Image (cartoon, rainbow, N blue to C red):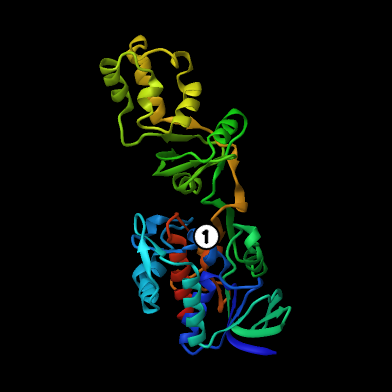
Amino acid sequence: MNSHDVLIIGGGAAGLMCAIEAGKRGRRVLVLEGSNKIGKKILMSGGGRCNFTNLHCSPENFLSTNPRFCISALSRYGPADFVGLVEKHNIPYHEKVSGQLFCDRSSKDILTMLSHECELANVTILTQCNVLSIARDEQFVVETSMGAFTSGSLVVATGGLSIPKMGASDFGYRIARQFGVNIRETRAGLVPFTFSGAVQEMTGRLSGVSLTATVSSGGRSFTEDILFTHRGLSGPAALQLSSYWTPGSDLEIDLVPAQDLPAILNAAKHSQPRSLVRTILSEHLPRALILELQAFVWPAVADRPLNEIGDGKLADIGENLHAWRLRPSGTEGYRTAEVTLGGIDTDELSSKTMECKQHAGLYFIGEVVDVTGQLGGFNFQWAWASAHAAGQVA
């Protein structure tokens, strides 16, 4: 039977990072990856450029039943640490918005870097290696399609349920259940909203139209781009809010957050009295959106000049565009979700080492844990930080 010091299930961002850190300590490390290549989600992330961290990373950027759990790992391995590794490998990168760091060339640079670091740390990686069963006696015994392996430490870095076509599965949660580890309810996060009926027909007609807006629900707001799609609403602001949205709740959308539309319409009534509402608004909103909105917001006065519309009605039109309410029928689910909310209960783990309190030598890291970042490189930073924490001790 093939014996190692550390067995890691999952060859994604967290699994590879943990392997590097454990290997640097002289541990004999084996990574088991079920698909035909490691790091598939790394390669597809950030539109192929990999948003590998965020310079402004803080615990406030993460969702968890225990919002303090992530503090320890993030404080001991922060964005500057990963940037140092990127710079060591001479990978060119740039900052987009709000501290988001992307590769200049390709996500392949990050995966090549991690692969090279694994080689330096003498890490063994097996791809297309399916885990068949896990048992524990004095050590963990992992039966696979490539034979049986044993180790004193087992690290579960299997990711969540998001994007099943990339190989996502519930395997990490099944391992947790086998060992009696509690799991917080999971759902899709960073995912587009869907609508039904007339609203879905409208978003379909607007498919491809984007603008900067503030989207709010349940006391949370995000001001970034939104994108209308054939099924509903996407774009960074919508994706961010989806992680906080409660099914059955409305979205409130401020379509022109930087302007005072009631004041603009009132001023135009005096300076351009024969103009139409849509003419004035065309300076602030895409024309296709205005034509759809007038059917929802001001159909009775759509073709009347401003000086024939009462001041109160004009104010209502402007205010409604600052607080347009829509109720999603749901989201696109795990099929297109970037992350999985919920997962391994953080009460079951040491925040310092990611080790299971019930089972010495069993670790859970990355997306499989009930710690989920906002959009913008935070989920990768959690992968690096939680993997680093486990890799220091496994």
Query: Is residue 353 in view?
Result: no
- In this view, the residue in front, 329 or 392, is 329
Label count reads 1
- Horizontal arrangement in the rendering, residue 260 relative to residue 317 (left or right): left
Query: Image quarter for residue 56?
Result: bottom left
Q: In the rendered image, which quarter is residue 89 located in?
A: bottom left
Answer few, some or many: residues within 10 Å of disc 1's Cα (few below 14, many 20 plus, some between 14 and 19): many
> Quadrant of the image for the N terminus?
bottom right
Q: Secondary structure at mark 1?
A: loop
> What residue did someone put label 1 on?
370
Q: Nearer the viewer, residue 108 or 45?
A: 108
- Is residue 200 shown above or below 310? below
Where residue 70 sits: x, y (%)?
43, 64
Name which residue lies at 51% across and 70% down: 13
Which residue occupies 43% across, 33% down? Answer: 286
How far across and down, in percent of the image, does residue 293 sit? Answer: 47, 26
Residue 264 at least partly seen: yes
Q: Position of residue 172 (x, y in %)?
A: 62, 66
Asked if residue 205 lies left or right of residue 140, the reply is left
The residue most toward the top is 308
Whole-percent x, y for residue 189 in the image: 53, 51
Instruction: Please indicate whether residue 148 sits to the left or right of residue 118 in the image.
Output: right
